[in-house]
Image: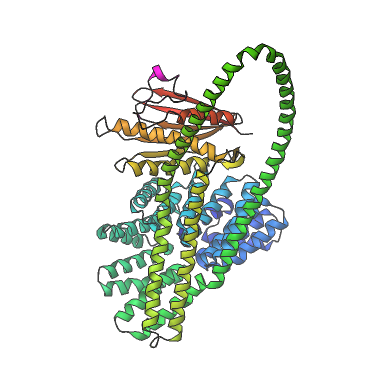
Amino acid sequence: MKNILLMILFLFIIQFVGAQQNEMDSLMNIINKQRRDTNEMRALLGVSGIYLFSKGADSAIIFAKEALDLARRLSFSKGEGEALNGLGEDLHTAGDFPQALEALFNALRISREIKDQDIESGSLDFIGVAYVDLGEYRKGLDYLYQAKKIAEKRPLNWASFRLSNIGHAYEKMNMLDSALFFQQQALVLSQDMPLFPLIIPLRSYILTRLGVIHARLGNQTQALSCYREVIRLDDLLNRGIAQYQLAELFYKLHQPDSSLHHARLAFISNQESFQKTWVLNASNLLAILYKEKNKIDSAFHYQEITMAMKDSLFGPEKFRRLQLLTISEQQRQQEIIQRQKEAQQEKETFINKIKMVALLGVIGVFLLLALVLYRNNRQKQKANIVLGEALSNLKSTQAQLIQSEKMASLGELTAGIAHEIQNPLNFVNNFSEVNNELIEELKSQKTTLKSEEQDELLNDIFQNNEKINHHGKRADAIVKGMLQHSQKSSGQKEPTDINTLCDEYLRLSYHGFRAKDKEFNAELKTDFDNSIGKVSIISQDIGRVLLNLYSNAFYATNTKQKTVDENYKPIVSVQTKKANNKVEIIVKDNGNGIPQKIIDKIFQPFFTTKPAGQGTGLGLSLSYETIKAHGGEIKVETEENAGAAFTIILPIS
């Protein structure tokens, strides 16, 4: 993963300062003139990039820090963002994840302040890859998709690079079909690109990751073909990785001599390219192979290298600094949200005061009218009492039906959340079982184990407990979210990320529907406008509206699927976009559509086309009232036998 990111940094060098290997002298010439301008800053960053390929991360970090210091002294914000991105990836390569993420988060903050999407997409890419390398696959994937979304709109679009990173994340998450899809797309795109110095390492990297996926799928012949093609291309950065993957594949195929040969080559190649993670992997495999051959001295030698490298990359101190950095970033985000919330509350307080004055005036007018009408209504008092009782009974019945509708939506949401919560619970169970095995091993071999081995077992148990705690908190957060949905709405508007809300309820609604009909499958499509930002809404109420529209869409496509041929594929899509200070949410399906003769009735209370017992007819009626209460509107477009599209329009302010 890291070597591809180095290619992007090298592309930056070529683009801005024309740095090739034979141009190092010209770069140093610029630096030696000591003009202290933007050309010198970029020359320093260019030398840093070249040294990362030729002399290792330590030398690269020195020049990247000099470039950053000069950019700050020149008050050159764009250059500061570029230097922070370069420094972050240098530190990442050196295995210093806490400092790397700190630099990259600062670059991300600067890019958004100066609205530079090229720097922003690069920061998001590097952050995403760092989190994947740390085992935080979901978080890393989120950053990678953000980078992909931004990069698609930019002139310089390394689509194959980003697709390969996304595929790598899916492979780490054991979603091999998705991983294979993205890696194959990346390979096709890279083959269509014109040949220049970076394209060979890019193809080598993609072929290496493709080989890993084929090996895991049991396609050994295709995996060997991919690895050998990488070695034939003779790209230093990827050659060592391919050699290691070959060694691992031969080890699994019970060919220890071939495995040992390629493991030695991988160890040497990765030392030459300064890739500490792959040096760690190669030394660990060599220790295992030499131990199986009873060559204890060699096994002990490589085991010592493995332990030293592991401590360098993932020691307790770096883990602690990483935790502090994560907490600091979360606090910074919370402070920004709190300031926005306070500003919004002040604005709403002022508006409410104006509304209160207007309301008092209206109440005064109504009181005057009431006094005038009172004398004319004496004769109707008895009739009014009867009507009042009937109205009270009607409101009570309506309230019960509304609560029933809300509980039905809660049931669908709960089924989806049950699917989501299973993932962290699996982690908790798995790590608990591993801890039990480690404790039993410690008990049974306490007298024979050395002190260092006991410490290593205890350290493994401690790390597993940390992971149990982490995934337990994830499960706790999901349960709290479910409880919050089930509670009565507070009626308080809060700044809410519309895109996240739409995506979350789409997934949960889909899982909830599948919980009732496990044979149902649908394709989910999303197209979110990232320029929308946060909108002040009552998120629980809008969430119920979305849940209702999604449920109706799944119901429509499921009904159609049961009546047409097998070539029909249910599709439900959601799109958001910003237009004229308003945000539009479009929920579309390819079901049977709504007949034109009833299109004017669908928002009426208690009107439903579902069979008796499957719907109360209040879903769309409540949705209409909820959107109206937010100052918005809801529209429907439909074509019989082709589907329907509901559009929610909400004011941004």
Q: Is residue 540 left or right of residue 549?
A: right
In the image, residue 428 lies at what x, y percent?
Answer: 42, 63
Above or below, comparing residue 567 to residue 203 in the picture: above
Above or below, comparing residue 243 to residue 172 in the picture: below
Q: Nearer the viewer, residue 128 or 560?
A: 560
Q: Is residue 260 visible?
A: yes
Q: Nearer the viewer, residue 369 or 344?
A: 369
Image quarter of residue 85:
bottom right
Q: Is residue 424 left or right of residue 534?
A: left
Image quarter of residue 83:
bottom right
Above or below, comparing residue 283 to residue 119 in the picture: below
Residue found 30% across the figure and 80% down from its top:
292
In the image, residue 277 lies at what x, y percent?
Answer: 45, 68
Above or below, comparing residue 17 to residue 290 in the picture: above
Region of the chain picked out in magenta, as a range: 590-608
Q: Is residue 565 left or right of residue 628?
A: left
